[in-house]
Amino acid sequence: MHAKIMRPLAMFGIAALMLLSLLQPLARHTALAQSHTLRALTHSAPYSIALANSYIGNTWRVEMESEFRGACAMPPLKAVVKCTAYNSGNDVAKQTQQIDNLISSHVDAILIDAASTTGLNGVIAQACSAGILVVSFDNQVTAPCALQINTDEVAFGKQGATFLVNAMGGKGNVVMVTGVPGAPADTQRNTGAMSVFSAHPGIKVISRFAGMWASDVAQRNTASALPSLGKVDGLWVQGGTDGVIRSLLAAHRPLVPVAGEAENGFREDMLKYKSQGFKAISIGQPPFVSLVSLQLAVEVLQGKRPKGNVNVPFPFVTTDTVKEGVTAFKNLPDSFFDDFTDSGPKATVVICVTAATKGTPCPGSIAIHLPK
């Protein structure tokens, strides 16, 4: 064959081999996400389900875990699951070890609120290879075999920031009180908020500091920051909003527009100061995402639902829509998250206060309706 013809053929062959080498990992990656046989299919209920939680240092995480414990002890779930829960102090290495121990103990499913988006992927792959169902929620992982309970954290940041920009008339100084540094949800929320603020030249972010999604920490850090700040026209807060409000009032600062979380104290302030023109939005990352994860795991293990992700919308109220006894509760602590249950006509979860506060079962049974 002529050399001029052979050279293009050789080049074509090399290119084909390169393409194949790129596609093979992708094929293995896709197969990893789909091909594992669940060990639960080899036995009947009850199924062993573990919650691997990365961080327990704020009210939201306590409620989330308490709801999990309470729901596991309620019919019909208590007849089909045996539940355990572990916390790793936001330590990736410790959470990895805990998950490794769960693999060794042959649990049927692991629900993960992760300390890292990617740092647990190796041990999660091991869990999937062992036939263990893995469901990721809140701070999500990128491991391809893990099912995802999705809440759009970028949208969370955008929604609060958009409300704030509109309430401020498109100009002024904003203070951002962020969450746990490095946590995926914190990064995504900040990204969403900054995409809105950056699009409005009249908005200037004059301070940004962590509140750790905890009311006491947010209060202390806000109190420390305020003396060095000039005029503040709006507050964007991921969590600990009730503490931020207390700091603002203690410093004799005006109640400027606030975009915050679903803390009860914040919502009670919305009701209290509404008549004074206070403008606020309270967006809830519902603690019951652990129950959505639990229900998804049970239905998959029982063969009633194919493997697939679930999207959970953010409930929210404004100073125009918040209602005492429905979305705010004067007899509950300020730091309590009021979106612990979804009591609407198309409720995802309806659960009692004692389950959210103490992890004890409610009277009667529990129904968890997975969003479509």
Image: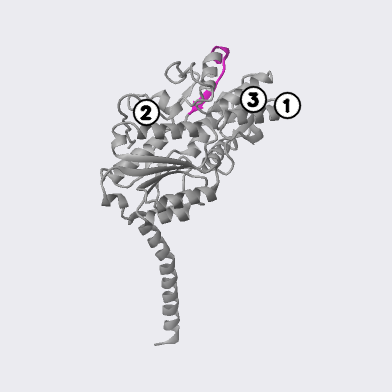
In space, the residues marked 2 and 1 are separated at their CA atoms by: 46 Å
For mark 1, what is the residue? Answer: 227
Mark 3: secondary structure: loop
User: Is residue 101 found inside the magenta-colored segment of the image?
Assistant: no
- Chain-order first, disc 2 or disc 1: 1
Tell me which corner region of the image, top left, top right, bottom left or bottom right, holds residue 112.
top left
Taking the image as shown, residue 156 lies to the left or right of residue 345, namely: right
| Magenta range | 273-283
- Image x and y of residue 216, in percent: 60, 28
**What quarter of the picture does the N terminus occupy?**
bottom left
Residues marked 1 and 3 touching at CB (< 8 Å): no
The vertical placement of 22 against 59, above or below, is below
Q: Nearer the viewer, mark 1 or mark 3?
A: 1
Residue type, mark 2 in image: Pro
Residue underneath mark 2? 361
Which residue is outermost to the front? Answer: 105
**Label 1, residues with CA under 10 Å away: few <14, some 14-19, many ≥20:** few
Residue that appears at 35% across and 31% down? 348
Left/right placement of residue 235 relative to residue 79 reads: right
Q: Callout 1: helix, strand or loop? A: helix
Foreground residue among 15 and 329:
329
Please say if the residues under marks 3 and 2 sit with CB atoms less than 8 Å apart: no
**Residue found at x 30% / y 45%:** 300
- Marks 2,1: beta carbons within 8 A: no
Q: Residue at x 45, y 81 (%)?
A: 7
**Alpha carbons under labels 3 and 2: distance apart:** 44 Å
Reading the image, the residue beneath label 3 is 233
| Badge 3 density bin: few <14, some 14–19, many ≥20, Cα 10 Å | many
Q: Residue at x 51, y 52 (%)?
A: 119
State the image coordinates of residue 252 (x, y, percent, origin top left): 68, 18
Residue type, label 1: Pro
